[in-house]
Amino acid sequence: MIATEAAAEGINLQFCSLVVNYDLPWNPQRIEQRIGRCHRYGQKHDVVVVNFLNRNNAADQRVYELLAEKFALFDGVFGASDEVLGSIESGVDFEKRIVKIYQECRSPEEIQASFDELQRELETEIDEGMKLTRKKLLENFDEEVHEKLRVNLKESTEYLNKYENWLWELAKYALHRHADFLSEGSAFHLKNNPYSSNAIPLGLYKMGRHVEDGHVFRIGHPLAQHILTDAANKKLPAAEIAFDYSGHPLKISILEPLVGISGYLSLFRLSVESFEEEDHLIFSAVTDTGAVLDDEQAHRLFSLPGHLGSGFKPAKTISDKLQQIFASGQSRIIEGISARNSVFFDDEMDKLEKWADDLKSGLEYELKELDREIKYLKTESKKILKLEEKLKAQKDIKELEKKRNTKRRTLFEAQDEIDSRKEGLIESVEKRLKQLISTTELFTIRWRVM
């Protein structure tokens, strides 16, 4: 869609994910409105912004520099927000200042000096606006919200997603005697190899997507695989853990009601072999009063710093209660897998039916065309007076009839192949329905939230 400025006013374009600014407005609020048409609730992709810029125009370059670097309009979450843009009072006033520079400045030196002055005037207001917005986001929103926001990499010293954070914390525990972890950035120097593998070199490791020097530390790396395997195979005795909510820097709403409360928790691994091999972690957790914690609460407990206490042996009544909760969670997962497999089976059968219909329709159409052509040639051959030409016409008809017979056999063979494929799919599904289910109790703890 090619649109005028009218497209920036009050319409929903979340089905688009690419904005091309053919002309780059001087008013940052107008640019934010354009991007905001696509960057709306329901958008499923990152919104990409492409700006056309005249590189030979010094003033245009400085305008873009201000918009991109100071207002941070095109990346991050702290730049293009109403509160930050509101710090410049009015985008119209800013636009008027730009117009004045274009009208009055005649040399690159004058342009640079005027823009430097404008930038100095705005710098304090913009920086304060960004700091305030960042503070509101980090202090007032839950940890769950932080995980869902893609923060500018420079602002967050390389954002790590949930699984990368888990791997990082596990690596710090597993390698604390074998590596020096750097205070800045997600990086460490591996001094010696704790695993007998030649695929793990010593040296600098960094976690993230833009690693220029050193080894990229991610889940697929041999070092990470050894750490994960080692952790998964550990036998963990029952123990008491005190989780420190008051010492956690971030707010976690669903854990606030648990402060001052204690209980029991078990973590089980459920492995299911069906259409695919799947592993699921199921938390079973109760308070001392018998209240059941939901999965998210139990999971979030492990976001808190904890202090290990002494070991204990849970009473049979507690173990039975935790087993009941696990059984309920297992049933939900098995039902979900069955429902998903059912949808998969329906989709596969639907694809097969459509393929069969297309194949049969194509062959039937070709047969009808051959019948029509044979009928036409037979009619025409009766009009021929010369015997030689009549013989040739009959040979042509015979060739077409042979071709028609071949097509008919192909149609029957295709029907047999369709039936064979259906039988194969049904047999495959029957085999996969025989699910192999195994469960493992990973650990049991007595917990307390301080």
Image: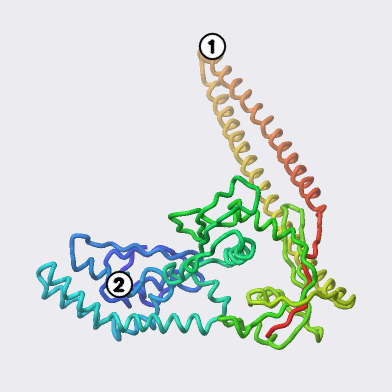
Q: Position of residue 427 (x, y in %)?
A: 79, 45
- Determine whether the residue tagged by mark 2 lies in a helix, strand or loop: helix
Give the residue displayed 74% in from the left and 64% down from the top. Answer: 336
Closer-to-camera residue (162/54): 162
Q: Residue furthest right?
A: 316
Give the position of the N terminus as an image quadrant.
Answer: bottom left
Badge count: 2
Give the residue displayed 72% in from the left and 65% down from the top. Answer: 281
- Determine whether the residue tagged by mark 1 lies in a helix, strand or loop: helix
Say which mark, if any, is on residue 387: 1
Looking at the picture, does residue 186 appear above or below residue 277? below
Relative side of 247 to 385, left or right: right
Say which mark, if any, is on residue 293: none
Q: Position of residue 72 (x, y in %)?
A: 35, 72
Closer-to-camera residue (175/58): 175
Q: Which image quarter: residue 355? A: top right
Whether label 1 touches label 2, CB < 8 Å: no
State how far apart marks 1 and 2 are (Cα): 88 Å
Closer-to-camera residue (296/310): 310
Label 1 neighbour load within 10 Å: few <14, some 14-19, many 20+? few
